[in-house]
Image: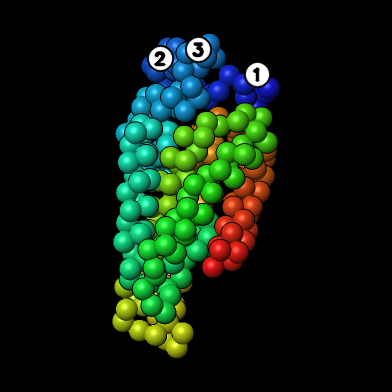
Amino acid sequence: MSEREHENGPQERAEPEDEAMNEPREKILGLVAAGKLSTSEGQLLLGALKPARRQVWKWLFSPFELASPSTVWMVAVGVCVASLALSQLGIRFDGAIDLHLADSRVSWWTALLDQAVAWPLSALVFWLLSPLTRRRARLPEVLGFVGAARLPYLLAALVVAAVGARSNLAESKSAALVIGLTVTPLLIWTCSLLYTGLRTATGSRGPRLTLTFFAALLLAEVSSKLILGALS
């Protein structure tokens, strides 16, 4: 991607079946270039122009290009509330991308602390490192996508809680296998959503985006573990 394309926000290559949509696409790109639309708003409008068959895939792996900021925030808050509720079943979200089944019900203080480091702290790390992609994302937007990206993570916690309630995870190989086969893809899905969320928030592409994502994810996990360890 050229420097000019990066600075102007989302760019789309014309495809044969999309020729009829070239004019509205160019108008959207022009508004982004003129600063009348943010990069994420431009992505949202561009996503709406694409055929419905493509949107199913986008809703699963790049929903931040289609959903409104208010919708993203509603999902993020809902995930946080549901995660707090799951803590009463013994689920700990003790890290940016970590969870496990505790021996007993998690206290409300611990559950709130877990959510603080898993969501706002992780979002802060992503926001602080976002300039490495050559464009700093807006903090509210980063908070939204980091919180909403944890939805598959919440589904993974439900699996751990359900399987753990019926067996001793430390002794049951079958239970560990079930969790491994179901939770691992969900955690990968969460990481995929975090990546596409950062991509949408910054309008970046390429190696610089990928390196920034992995650096932010690693730093978020390490810092969350250090803070929880210091406060526990």
Nearer the observer: mark 3 or 2; the answer is 3
Residue that label 3 marks? 30
State the residue at coordinates (56%, 63%): 231
Residue 94 visible (yes or no): yes
Q: Nearer the viewer, residue 47 or 132?
A: 132
Badge 3 amino acid:
Gly
Give the side of residue 72 with respect to residue 170, left or right: left
Q: Is mark 3 on a helix, strand or loop?
A: helix
Residue that label 1 marks? 4
- The furthest residue to the bottom: 171
- Label 1 vs 2, first from the N-terminus: 1
* Callout 1–callout 2 Cβ contact below 8 Å: no
Q: What element carries label 2?
A: helix
- Label 1 vs 3, first from the N-terminus: 1
State the residue at coordinates (57%, 38%): 127
Give neighbour class at mark 3: few <14, some 14-19, many 20+ (Cα, 10 Å). some
Q: How far apart are marks 3 and 2 (CA)?
A: 10 Å
- Label 3 vs 2, first from the N-terminus: 2
| Residue 181, percent from left and from top | 44, 70
Q: Nearer the viewer, residue 18 or 144?
A: 144
Q: In this view, does 172 lie above or below 16?
A: below
In the rendered image, which quarter contains the N terminus?
A: top right
Residue 24, disc: 2
Q: How far apart are marks 1 and 2 (CA)?
A: 20 Å
| Residue 59, percent from left and from top | 37, 41
| Residue 185, percent from left and from top | 45, 61
